Amino acid sequence: MSITKLENTFSLFDTTAQILQEELDCTYLEALAETAENLFHGAVIQEEVSEVTKRRLEKEYSKQNLTSLQKEEIRKGFQLAILKGMKDAVQANHQMTPDAIAMFMGYLVGKYTSHLQQLTMLDPAIGTGNLLTAVLNHQPNKKLEAFGVDVDDLLVKLAYNNANLQEQAISLFNQDGLSNLFVEPVDVVVSDLPVGYYPDDNNAANFKLKAEEGHSYAHYLFIEQGLRYTKPGGHLLFLVPNSMFEEEEAKRVNALIKDEAYIQGMLQLPETMFQNKNHAKSILVLQKKGIGIEPPKEALLVNLPSFSNMQAMEKIMAQINHWFSEQKTKSNY
């Protein structure tokens, strides 16, 4: 995507969001959701907006036609506007999945599901929808249906706008991602796991990975929840903290995974992507057990170089592609 096109797309979202923020006396993110609604409907739909402001907005909207853009171009422009609004507005758990990681996870999903022409997907902690839409955008020539869940109503609204503008079929649910979901088991679960303690001890009691004392770890429960909503033989791709398997209760997570799934891969992301190396993450790939599903000959274990190091990335990608070509001889793929 050219820098100019990205700048213009971001500017469209940003300028009109600022106009609505002032007019509606709301936060930038709330105004961003409103302007996205206008762009989707092709009209200013806020009745409380003055005629002067309406004309200002219409003038800005006329400067760029979103229908001429690719889905990824819209996603990236909208993502930059969300990032601007998030700087001082949200908790750490609500921070957006970095773009390079989101697209790389999309590549991995494509590799693991290359044998499927139709694909159902779930993100039980969808946030603004950036990760899920990036993954969907990297599945060309497939019939896609996706589901997203988040307890934060503003994030769900942004995810809804994100999906609409990119014309992605995503059913969204504004509820606790660890509650009973109105979703049938899917082919793929993908999620940037919320890390930390889960406050609802009563609901946590419904999980095998509940803490024996005090609050349970949310990231443990989301792994178990993901397994509940995955078809036999389906895949789960989680962004997890590197420290997860070093935690005191990690043996319980390992036991659950051993009982219900096979570890297909663990791809450690470069520490340079994270401000604090203690917050570094990896992509954990699981395949749910089922009839005819066998473990891989060996798991895909990779330490990824910096995404900006093209030579090192090409070498790693060749290794990953070789791993997948070897797996194709098995019935799993």
Image: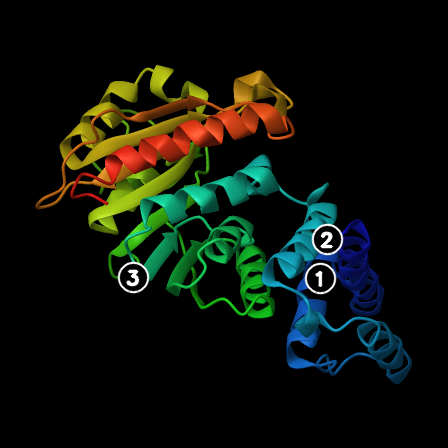
Residue denoted by label 3: 183
N-term-proximal mark, 3 vs 1: 1
Q: Position of residue 136 (x, y in %)?
A: 46, 56
The answer to whether 46 is drawn above or below residue 300 in the figure is below
Residue drawn at 57 percent across, 17 percent down: 277
Residue denoted by label 1: 32
Amino acid, disc 2: Ala
Q: Position of residue 323 (x, y in %)?
A: 33, 31
Q: Along the horizontal axis of the image, is 311 left or right of 258?
A: right
The answer to whether 188 is drawn above or below residue 42 in the figure is above
Residue drawn at 60 percent across, 25 percent down: 311
Q: Along the horizontal axis of the image, is 260 left or right of 274?
A: left
Mark 2–mark 1 distance (CA, rounded to whole Å): 8 Å
Q: Secondary structure at mark 2?
A: helix
Q: Along the horizontal axis of the image, is 14 left or right of 285?
A: right
Badge 3: few (under 14), some or many (20 or more) residues near its Cα, within 10 Å?
some
The answer to whether 100 is drawn above or below residue 214 in the figure is below
